[in-house]
Each structure stands twice: as structure tokens, then as C-alpha cells.
Amino acid sequence: MPGNSFGNLFRITTWGESHGPALGVVVDGCPAGLEISKDDIQFELDRRRPGQSKITTQRKEPDSVDILSGVFEGKTLGTPISLMVRNADVISKSYEDIKDTYRPGHADYTYDAKYGIRDYRGGGRSSARETVGRVAAAAIAKKILGMQGIVTRGFVRQVGKIVAKKVDFDEIEKNIVRCPDAKKAEEMIKLIEDVRKEGDSIGGTVEVVTTGLPPGLGSPVFNKIDADLAAALMSLGGIRGFEVGMGFEASKRKGSRVNDVMYKDDEGKLRFKTNNSGGLLGGITNGEDLVVRIAIKPTSSISKTQHTVDKHGRPKELKVKGRHDPCLCPRAVPIAEAMVNLVLVDHLLQSRISRI
């Protein structure tokens, strides 16, 4: 079954390749009457576009979005919404010399094994450029969630061994690495610059926090929110791990140190004294902040010479040309936010049919 669609009631299908004429997405299931503008979508695309700073790829793409259908006089019609972004800064000749060579860490070999044909220019469909459609669609999801007071914010928690200790949401967009800890941001930026000069890359961790979620969103057994979030975030290229709340740290502790104790606050609401569960119990929101984390591998495209083979199995030495992020984390932040919002809006719409 083709794997280009995601979601149930709020369903998206992305299309396009890295060096094709355009990329985009079709959104089906968005309720009618939602006020949405090109600017709403463009704002999110500008946050993920390449060429933003000295520590990202220098590919220059305006990522200007066109709304082709589903919106009339600034409001959604309840019909499929088609969004398109044209590619502008395409330099396919960088890939001509290696079109038959399998790049280490990339999906070149597996795409050939599956389809027998692939678009070798920039990775084609396996490129992170595919996420343009996801982010565009999630701008609509974000608008719906915002009407309910639900806000999702992502940030870079770790680059290499450097870990943010403070979380100041106001600091995130003030530095080019999108770290909520100003002091650690400086260290991260220096590390990324150093590995880039070496012709190498570095990995890290992105954390996403959602506030304002009501208790009761999510469905047992196979559509738990954390299960859907895992599928959503692991579908992004380069993701090697997923955590909710305390995550893997919980496996090292006793139950008495992990369970979140409940109490009634001054307003009579049931709350939790800690949030080790990351806002989910049984795959259903408990009213606390939703906290998820993803581990991101170092960028596979590096300018160091590497050994590999071509499609005939002949040994090759490879030095990847082109423009690539030395660290995926800063631009992964809005993309991770997008996938979280797509999951949450789907569950929000499903919740409306859970009770009479």
C-alpha cells in the first residue's frame, strides 16, 4: 500500500520530489468555515525553509505557497485543499557523477531494491524537502488547534553532547540553533560550525511540548496518541529514536519514582504533581503538557571521502557535493511541531464523535 498519506479524519497526502518542478500536499477532512490565509501557511514554511543561517544548507528556496483549491474568500470549503510550492534553486548537476553510486546513510540502495528506478537528484522522494507538504498542511492543523487553546512548541534540546539545561520558550527563535538555553545555544552553534569545517555532521535531540490539551483525547488500543506520534515522527527522515515524558530514563527507575501522583487543585480540577508520563495515560491525554522527544542522526551527506559501491557492486570512493545541513536539528523543529499538530488535530476531530 502506498505510504504517501497520513491521518484518519484529517488526512494529508504529500507529493513531489526534491529536484522536481514542485512539491505539495492535499489536505482532506478539514472542516468548512475555517479562516485560513496564504500568510498563515507561509509563516510556517519560512521557519523550515533552507538557507536560513550559516549552520543550515545554503540552498536558496523562497518556498512560496500557492493555494490551488479548497479555500474561497479566505475560508475553507470543507473540500480537499491543495497546496503547492515550486522548486527554484535546483542544481541537479551535483548528482550526475554519482547517479549510479549508493551514498552511505541514504535510501539510494533501498529505493532501487524496492522500485527498480529512482530519482537520484537530491534523493528524490526520500529527501527532507518532502516535508514542505507536511509543514504546509500542519499550518491548517495549527489554526484549528489554536482555536481550542492548544499550542505546540518545539526546540533543540541537545546537539552532540551539549544539552540545554534551561527551557525559556521566548529564547527559541532568538538564536539560529533554536535552543531554549541561550548559553548552551552558543556552544551548540560553535560545535556545528566546527564539524562543518571538518566536512562532517552532527546529530542531536529535538523536544516538542504541547500545552492546553484537554483530558480525554486519544483512542485505545491501536490508535493511542503516543502510538500515532511515534508513527508520525519516525516517518521523518533521519529519526532514530522516540520518547514520551521521562522516556527511556523510566526503565532505570522504580515505579514509586515514576508514577505521577494525582491531586485536586484550588479550582477543583484533577491534576498531577509530576509529569513523568508526558501528559498521556493509556494513550489518552490526561490534561498535563504533552512532552515528546526525537533523536536525530547526523546528516548523511558529508564532504569527507567515504567508501561505498555502485549499483553493479563495484567499489567507489565518494565525496558528496551539493548543499547540506551539517546538523538537521534546527530545521527539524518546525517539522516535528508539524507532525505533532497533525496527530493532535486528527484526535481532536475524532473526539467529537466519541460521545453522544
Image (cartoon, rainbow, N blue to C red):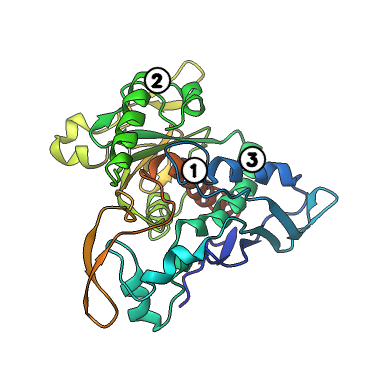
Q: Nearer the viewer, residue 43 or 254?
A: 43
Three-letter amino acid code of the residue under disc 1: Glu
Give the Cα separation between the discs numbered 2 and 1. Answer: 21 Å
Label 2 sits on a secondary structure element that is: helix
Give the Cα separation between the discs numbered 3 and 1. Answer: 13 Å
Task: Locate residue 219, reporting x and y percent.
Answer: 45, 54
Q: Is residue 164 above or below residue 356?
A: above
Three-letter amino acid code of the residue under disc 2: Ala
Residue linked to disc 1: 337
Residue linked to disc 2: 182
Q: Tell us which disc is closer to us: 3 or 1.
A: 3
Q: Is residue 314 above or below residue 103?
A: below
Q: Quadrant of residue 105?
A: bottom left
Dot placed on the residue nearer the N-terminal end, 3 or 1: 3
Residue linked to disc 3: 43
Q: Circle 2: is it few (<14), some (14-19), or many (20+) Cα within 10 Å? A: many
Give the Cα separation between the discs numbered 3 and 2. Answer: 24 Å
